[in-house]
């Protein structure tokens, strides 16, 4: 074989090896992308529950490097809290790692090194690791019982601050390769970004909930005088009925039939007071969003009852056109009532400037295209100027002298959180129509 032939064979072998290396690198990239995609899907499917996300992080990290076990801990003031753990195959009767580890434990000391350097830590064989002998007896027994051998601890950083160690390992002594360590390190970095996005979304969601509650409190404050009048009426009527019952009892012989009727009327009056107070308390409570079975017509009627006094004060009539047979939908009853409460009060206040003509609020419900549930609140006020119409849902934009400019913004965010839409249109010859529609999904 001549020299040229040998050189050609060598070049061909190099090309084969190069092609094989490229295939391996491509396979690693694809596995990492699949792992990140799994985490992103978990975030999308459980935006308000972090546990499925933590579990997916462990599953993906273990799959990337053919690991037998993995754990994910978050840094807390008291120590390192275990939020996810998995072992393949699971062993019945074996205790999981302690939920909380103090910083002085073996994992805590390794975490200290991780925090100082910001670099991954690999222990080829944890069973013979120097620091194992200095660990506490319970921790050492737990490590040996679980058969932990080769271990890789990778930092998860948020704004260059360590939020916790992501640890994977093998029950066999088989150190992770440089490529595997880089793969898990990149995965941890991208996962930390995804977790940070989720954390900020949760904070935003909590702020929106607090703001919505504050808006309900302010709105109920505006209604306080009207509601006081609304409560005083049935209380006075109940008192009158009870006094009448006493007078019927004083007759000789007592007029028991009229006594029963008077007491029955008093019961109805007190039930009415209890219903008003219960609705007020529900709207004033600060609670996390929830899914209820909502009969929209019934929910609207409760709000109308609360605004009856305000309508009388403004000389306005509230009329309804409720469609029958609307489906029971799934949603946050209090939040949906908050939307309608804001819209009704806005309509009543808008008609305060009307000098002539009727003052009327019409509330309608029906089902529209795509089976959406529709609610409309229409007034006979002066209507909206083009500028107001274009800016109405902007935060802090208001046409009221003492308004915060957040009511309609909150209403729109509530409707959109129910996958719906809220919009407004002008009415002829005057007035405005606020409308929202949400998917009529069965509960």
Image: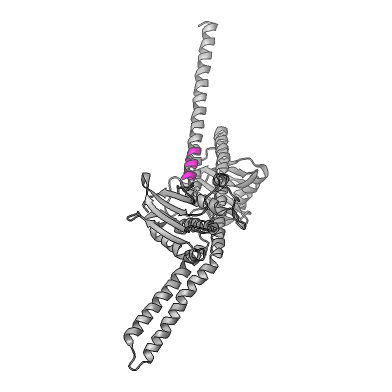
The residues colored magenta run 36-44
Q: Total marks drawn?
A: 0
Residue 164 at x, y percent in the picture: 59, 48
Q: Is residue 325 magenta?
A: no
Q: Whole-percent x and y of residue 49?
A: 49, 51
Q: Can residue 37 be found in the magenta stretch?
A: yes
Task: Using the rendered image of the protein, determine whether residue 140 is visible from the camera's viewpoint.
Answer: no
Along the viewing direction, whichever of 171 and 48 lies nearer the viewer: 48
Look at the picture and state if 262 lies above or below 121: below
Q: Residue at x 67, y 42 (%)?
A: 117
Residue closer to the observer: 57 or 66: 57
In the picture, residue 323 is in which quadrant?
bottom left
Q: Is residue 416 visible?
A: yes
Image quadrant containing the C terminus: bottom left
Decide if residue 102 is on the left or right side of residue 382.
right
Examine the residues drawn in magenta and state their main secondary structure.
helix
Is 282 left or right of 178, judged from the image as shown? left
Q: Nearer the viewer, residue 256 or 37?
A: 256
Q: Tell me: 129 left or right of 47.
A: right
325 over 265 or under it: above or below: above
Residue farthest toward the bottom in the current orientation of the protein: 252
Front one among 243 and 299: 243
| Residue 140 place in picture, x, y as percent | 56, 53
The extreme top residue here reads 2
Q: Residue furthest front?
A: 356
Q: How is the image coloured?
A: one colour
Query: What residue sits 35% from the left and 85% below the top?
Result: 259
Q: Looking at the image, which residue is at 62% across and 44% down?
A: 158
Residue at the image point whose x is 37% and y is 88% from the top: 248
Give the percent coordinates (x, y) of residue 237: 44, 78
């Amino acid at each position: 074989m001549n020299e040229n032939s040998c050189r050609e064979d060598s070049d061909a072998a190099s090309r084969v090896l190069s092609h094989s290396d490229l295939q391996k690198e491509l396979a690693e990239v694809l596995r990492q992308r699949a792992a990140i995609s799994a985490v992103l899907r978990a975030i999308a499917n459980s935006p308000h529950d972090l546990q499925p996300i933590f579990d997916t992080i462990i599953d993906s990290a273990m799959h990337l490097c053919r690991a037998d076990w993995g754990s994910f801990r978050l840094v807390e003031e008291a120590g390192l809290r275990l939020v996810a753990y998995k072992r393949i195959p699971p062993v019945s009767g074996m205790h999981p790692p302690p939920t909380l580890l103090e910083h002085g434990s073996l994992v805590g000391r390794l975490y200290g090194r991780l925090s100082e350097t910001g670099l991954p830590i690999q222990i080829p064989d944890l069973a013979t690791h120097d620091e194992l002998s200095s660990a506490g007896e319970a921790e050492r027994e737990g490590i040996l019982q679980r058969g932990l051998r080769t271990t890789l601890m990778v930092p998860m950083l948020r704004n260059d601050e360590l939020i916790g160690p992501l640890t994977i390992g093998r029950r066999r002594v088989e150190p992770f390769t440089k490529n595997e360590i880089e793969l898990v390190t990149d995965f941890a970095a991208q996962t930390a970004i995804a977790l940070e996005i989720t954390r900020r979304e949760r904070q935003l969601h909590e702020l929106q909930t607090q703001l919505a509650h504050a808006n309900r409190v302010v709105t109920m404050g505006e209604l306080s005088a009207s509601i006081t009048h609304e409560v005083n009426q049935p209380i006075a009527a109940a008192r009158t009925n009870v006094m009448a019952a006493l007078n019927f009892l004083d007759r000789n012989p007592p007029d028991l039939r009229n006594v029963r009727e008077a007491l029955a009327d008093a019961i109805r009056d007190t039930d009415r007071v209890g219903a008003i107070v219960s609705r007020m308390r529900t709207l004033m409570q600060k609670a996390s969003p929830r899914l209820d079975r909502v009969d929209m017509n019934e929910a609207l009627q409760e709000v109308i009852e609360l605004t009856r006094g305000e309508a009388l004060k403004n000389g306005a009539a509230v009329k309804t056109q409720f469609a029958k047979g609307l489906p029971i939908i799934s949603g946050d009853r209090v939040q949906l009532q908050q939307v309608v409460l804001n819209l009704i009060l806005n309509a009543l206040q808008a008609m305060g400037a009307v000098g002539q003509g009727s003052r009327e609020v019409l509330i309608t419900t029906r089902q529209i295209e795509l089976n959406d549930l529709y609610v409309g609140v229409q007034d006979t006020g002066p209507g909206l100027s083009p500028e107001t119409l274009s800016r109405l849902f902007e935060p802090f934009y208001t046409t009221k002298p003492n308004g915060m400019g957040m009511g309609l913004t909150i209403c729109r965010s509530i409707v959109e959180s129910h996958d719906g839409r809220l919009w407004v249109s002008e009415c002829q010859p005057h007035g405005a129509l606020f409308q929202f529609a949400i998917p009529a999904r069965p509960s």
